[in-house]
Amino acid sequence: MLCSVRRPCFLTPTSPMLKVTRVILGFIRFVRFKDPFASENSFEFDSNGHRAFTFKDVSGEEINSKAMELSEYEIIIVTKCPLKSTPLILSPITSLKLLAITGNDMDAVPSNLSSLNNLTYLDLSNNAILGIPPEIGQLTALRVLNLMGNKCCTIPSEIGNLNRLQVLNLSDNKIYRLPSAICSLQSLLCFDCSANSLCSLPLNISDLFNLQVLRASNNQITQLPKNFGMLKCLKILHLDSNRFDFLPSEIFGCESLQEFVFSYNQASVLSFKLSSLQKLRHLNLQGNSIGYFPESLLTRLKHLQELDLSGCSLTFIPGAIGTCSELQLLDLSKNELNNIPMDVSSLKKLVGLFLSGNSIEILPDWVSELKGLITLEIQDNQLVSLPQCFSKLLRSLRVLDLSRNNFTSLPNSVCSEKSRLNFLSVDENPLLSVPVDLGNLTALTHLSISNCVNLYELPESLGELIRLQSLNISGNNLSTLPKSLHLLESLKYLDISRNNFKLLNRCLTECQVQYLWQIPEG
């Protein structure tokens, strides 16, 4: 088995790692695992002389005992070990470069951690650590520090001594204040302080002049420091799920910003100055009751690739949306829209269009002009039909959700022989029938026709969907199943619950499904 990890990430070993024979970690190159100790709970591997050792599901006493023998190792990984009652004691291992102690319910940082002078990567994520000792500041070779998923309330100011640190993850803790010393980390490129109890960011945050990624989601922040706009290298900014009453003007100075996530705040008005972010590629304003998106903004944000305006209380979309020629994903779901402007047809690069949860009664013909569309979600609307030309979309479309509309039959335009659909859902419609042409959808892997209480039978052509892996036909009024059901040799999941079966067809016993839901007795 070959495992490739090319993107920057935090190393979190899991049980499937025991089956891995080679790992590409980028900074370690090729790694080959071996198990000289003949134990499933510990193994070592090497990579061009880089020696490493992993502990899994062993006691703290065993780790402390074995650690004395690891003086020449460069990588140590400890995962899923019961360490709550036994603190780890790490002897000085001058060769150690990577230490990952993750998912162990450990409540304190290992003793003698500060003696690991050459450590460049430290991952203590998903434990129960209550505090970080000041000695952390002595690990001056650190480039990556991951403290995600612990119970820390404060961070020592000594963290500011880690002048080589490039990645810092403090997310999912209980931190209520960040020390100003954290802004001394002038090599910092990526900082994540999401899911804490922060009310503000450090006033001197502009000192992090190399910062490219800042994630401060799920806090209680109400405003940004006045000098925030001096972060000229910032490319990704996440401020979602905070307590902003308005779009903070301080971000308009972040001229390199490419991704801005501001969902689930309390903004009601958008500033025209947002257009100053000329490099913006991804904009997420989901869940803000802005009510109106200025047309002048759309004409200036010409490089947008993803725009999420879901749940923004919008009643119409400006025609200028058509000028965003680079747009690939457009989410307008959960608004108050009755129609979509024809200008959307100009978005030739669009691959995802999300319109669910509106009041749309008619899907216009021009939607068939979106030749590259892959995903179309229009559930929770008031559609009764689709345009006949809709079949033109089926050469590119892979995902189609028509759930919770007013269809009385699956539209013929969906069942085209040209279809390459992989996923189709028509749940909770007043369906009276399903056409025989359903068998044309031979690329389908997932089909859901559930909770259609007026549906009494399914066509035998269902058996022609030879690639089907998941079939949900629960909550209908079916009394029999198609005899062709046993032909679905790829089927793994089948839900036939909440129907009116008196006696199940023999074909069901011939199905080789892995998951079969609620088969009635009889």
Image (cartoon, rainbow, N blue to C red):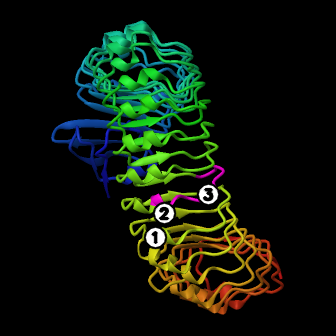
- Asked if residue 522 is among those painted magenta in the image, a careful observer would answer no
Q: Which residue lies under the disc numbered 2?
A: 375
| Magenta span dominant secondary structure | loop
Q: Residue 377, position in %: x, y?
A: 56, 62
Tag 3's secondary structure? loop
159 to the left or right of 261: left
Q: Which residues are magenta?
A: 333-344
Q: Quadrant of the N terminus?
A: bottom left
Residue at image location 35% in from the left, 32% down from the top: 257
In the image, which disc is placed on residue 49?
none
Closer to the camera in the image, 514 or 337? 337
- What amino acid is at disc 1? Leu
In the image, which disc is placed on residue 397?
1
Q: Which residue lies under the disc numbered 3?
A: 356
Q: Residue 386, position in %: x, y?
A: 59, 75
Mark 3, other Cα within 10 Å: few <14 / some 14–19 / many ≥20:
many
Residue 59 lies, with reference to residue 411, above or below; the image says above
Which numbered disc, 1 or 3, marks the residue that appears first in the sequence? 3
Q: Residue 144, position in %: x, y?
A: 33, 26
